[in-house]
Image (spheres, helix red, strand yellow):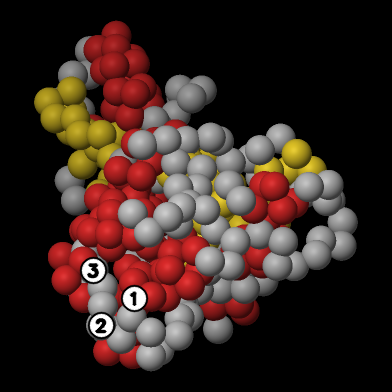
Amino acid sequence: MRIPRGGVFGLLGPNGSGKTTTIGLLLGLISPTAGTIRLFGADVRHGHQGALRRIGAMVESPAFYPELSGRANLRFFQGIGRHGGRDELPKLLELVGLADRADDAFRTYSLGMKQRLGIAYALLGNPELVFLDEPTNGLDPAGMAEVRELILRLAGAGHTIVLSSHLLHEVEQLCDDVAILSRGAIIAQGKVRELVHAQGGVRLKTTDDARAAQLLATLDWSGAVRSEDGYLVVAAPPDRAGEITRALCREEVFVTEMVPLRMSLENYFLQVTAREPGAEQARQ
């Protein structure tokens, strides 16, 4: 797995696929039994502490001291190894929307507020690489939108964000690249747009649909052609639409309607994970 510098990288997979284990390995919380892990170009077995100073993380549910305030919790974690001074805390608390509750005890926070404090913790010291595990868990729709905007701002400011989430529509909105894990192995990786675009199709009507179906089925780059709700649906990348039109026109079959169909990341995820051995048993 290669995580490009800058932008938002999605780490996806069914339960038990190895997402949290992978993050734990990268953070040095779990020792690898084989293989190589390199962070910022350096092997983590030789100088992991230096790499960790450039990393922030919120893994699973954030845990803080319940009787301390949000501000005091952040100040405590600053004092046990993270960089940054007290002037950093007001900015972080404002950034995550907790400025007005910063001095309230953590035990009084809602689940969504606890998640926001966890994100502020991950940002202590202005890290270059930030791991966020389910960062919108417990947030209402407005809060989720705020966190998505925050993640995009962080990526735009030069941070590299690794996002693990079960909300695939959220990942599709945020991520530039993704890796999909299953049973500890990568089964798909690449840019979100390219992965879903390659699995799309084209829906069309023509002056002779029966003839069009026969012609399209003979094209080397065209997949299956089927009838659906009075339309023809061609399993071909939407950017081939012009070639479809030309191929039909040469045979005097003319397109009267054409709509590109784009597969969602959720559908793509379900498609590739369903191919894995034992996928059906895993869902049960």
Q: Which residue, as the protein is rendered here, is positioned at the far left? A: 256
Q: Secondary structure at mark 1?
A: helix
The residue that mark 3 highlights is 98
- Residue 268 coordinates in the image, percent (x, y): 44, 51
Q: Nearer the viewer, residue 128 or 67?
A: 67
- Callouts 1 and 2 close, C-beta under 8 Å: yes
The tag on residue 70 is: 1
Residue 260 is left or right of residue 220, and the answer is left
Q: Secondary structure at mark 3?
A: loop
Image quarter for residue 246? top left
Image quarter for residue 87? bottom left
The mark nearer the N terminus, 3 or 1, is 1
Three-letter code, disc 2: Asp
Residue 248 is left or right of residue 281, and the answer is left
Q: Nearer the viewer, residue 165 or 109?
A: 109
Q: Callout 3 environment at 10 Å: few (<14), some (14 to 19), or many (20+)?
A: many
Residue at position x 48%, y 25% from top?
221
Residue at position x 58%, y 67% from top?
80
Three-letter code, disc 3: Leu
- Callouts 3 and 1 close, C-beta under 8 Å: yes
Q: CA distance from mark 3 to mark 1?
A: 8 Å
The tag on residue 153 is: none
The residue that mark 2 highlights is 104
The mark nearer the N terminus, 3 or 2, is 3
Q: CA distance from mark 3 to mark 2?
A: 10 Å
Q: Is residue 43 above or below residue 239?
A: below
Q: Callout 1 environment at 10 Å: few (<14), some (14 to 19), or many (20+)?
A: many
Three-letter code, disc 1: Gly
- Residue 113 coordinates in the image, percent (x, y): 28, 75
